[in-house]
Amino acid sequence: MYDVVVVGGGPSGATAAEDLARGGHSVALLDRAGRIKPCGGAIPPQLVREFDIPEDQLVARINTARMISPRGRKVDIPIENGFVGMVNREDFDEFLRERAGLGGAVRVTGTYKRIERDSGGTRVIYRDKRSGEERALHTRLVIGADGARSNVARDEVPGCDRIPYVVAYHEIIEAPDAVGAYDPARCDVIYDGRISPDFYGWVFPHGKSASVGMGSMVRDVDLKRATADLRAASGLSDCRTIRREGAPIPLRPLDRWDNGRDVVLAGDAAGVVAPSSGEGIYYAMVGGRAAATAAAASLRSRRVRDLRLARQLFMRDHKTVFRVLASMQNAYYRSDDRRERFVSLCHDIDVQRLTFEAYMNKKLVKARPMAHLRIGLKNLAHLTRLVPACHT
C-alpha cells in the first residue's frame, strides 16, 4: 500500500514524487517510458534556484529575445541581470525522475489504464511495459500528472474537457553555425498570422540542436507546413531534422483539481500553462509541489478537503500573472494588425525591463509604479489606434 501513486513522470509528477518521498511518504511514480514532451525548453533562473537544478542540465543560456512582427520588423530585447536557461526535455525529465528515485520514490514503467475502488481501497491499474499485463498499485491517494487531456482527469475530475487548448508542433533540428539569422544565444518569437493565426512561432537554441515550431487553436491549420515555412524564413530548411513532436497545450487552469475523494491533479493535467507565452515547465513544477503539499496535508489530517489546497496554493501565487497574460493574448493575438502593435509595444524600455524581471523572478514587479502607469497608457494607445503600429 502506497501513500501516493503519481501518474506521469514529467516535471510536475517527478517533482511531486520527490517532495513526497523526501517527506517520508511511500510513493510510486508511474511513467510510460519513451515519450518526449514537445517543448521549447525554456526555464527561468527562478526555477533553477527554487528546484536546485544543476548547471549541467542547461544546454544553452539565452541573453536576448527577438520579437518578429508580421511585417518582418525585429525588436531585440536584452535580458539584463539574468538569462533564460534552455533544457532538452528528454534529458531534463529523466534527471528529475532519477532524482525522485534517489529520494525514495519507486519508479514503475507502464501505461495508466484506470482507477478501481472497492472495500479494500483504491488501486491504480496500469499495463506493465515489459510483460504487457495489467497490474495494480494499491494507494491511499493519486496525483494525476499525466499531461494535457489527462486520462486521470478525464476519469475523475468533472469539467476537464471544457478548457481551450493550443496544439503545438515543433521539429528538433541540428543547430547551424552561428551565421545569418540564427544566433545560439537568442530566442526568436515570431508573431505572424502566416505562421500561426492565433498564437506564435519560435526558434529556440538548444546548444547542438534547436527547437523550431508553432502552435494554434485553429483546427485546419497545417502545423507541419507552417513549421516548414518558418524554417524557410529563418534560413533553417537545410538543417537535418532529428525528430518531430506535437501535443496539446492547455490555456487556462481547471476550475477544480481534485475529485473530492482521493485524486488531485498537477501540471498540464491541471491546465497550468501560462497564457500568451505558453510557458509550462516552471508552472508544472510549482503545481507538482502544490499537489504534493496538498496530498501530504490530506494524509496527515485524513480530510479529503485538504486536496483543494493544491489549487488554492498555486492560484494564490500565480493567479494575477495568469490573468494579465490571458488579457494580453486576448488583446493582441487576434489579428496581424494587433500583433504588429504588440511588437511595437516591445520597443518600449519599460515593457522590456518589467517583462523579463517578471519572467525571471516569477512575480509582477511592483517597485516601479510610474513604469506600470506608462505601460498602461501606451497599451491603451495601441489598442485604440491612437498611435501607428510602427510607432517606437
Image (cartoon, rainbow, N blue to C red):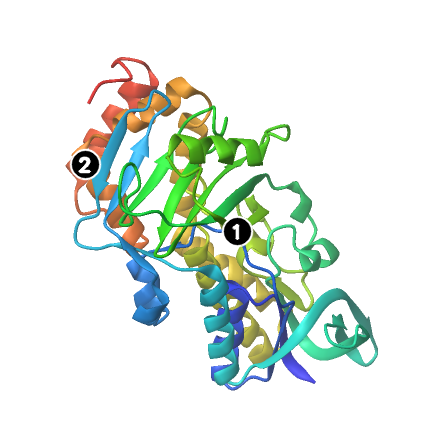
Q: Which mark is residue 38?
A: 1
Q: In the shown orientation, is residue 276 left or right of residue 297? A: left
Tag 2's secondary structure?
Answer: helix
| Residue drawn at x 29%, y 60% as measured from the top left | 45
| Residue drawn at x 60%, y 61% as measured from the top left | 35
Residue sitting nearer the eye, 12 or 316: 12
* Figure quadrant of the C terminus: top left
Q: Which residue is mark 2?
A: 350
> In x, y percent, where is residue 32?
65, 67
| Residue drawn at x 63%, y 31% as measured from the top left | 219
- Between the residue at mark 1 and the residue at mark 2, the CA separation in whole angstroms equals 32 Å
Name the mark nearer the viewer: 1 or 2: 1
Q: In the shown orientation, is residue 31 left or right of residue 363? A: right
Occupied quadrant, residue 282:
bottom left
Query: Do we see residue 290 in this rendering?
Result: no
> In x, y percent, where is residue 359?
31, 49
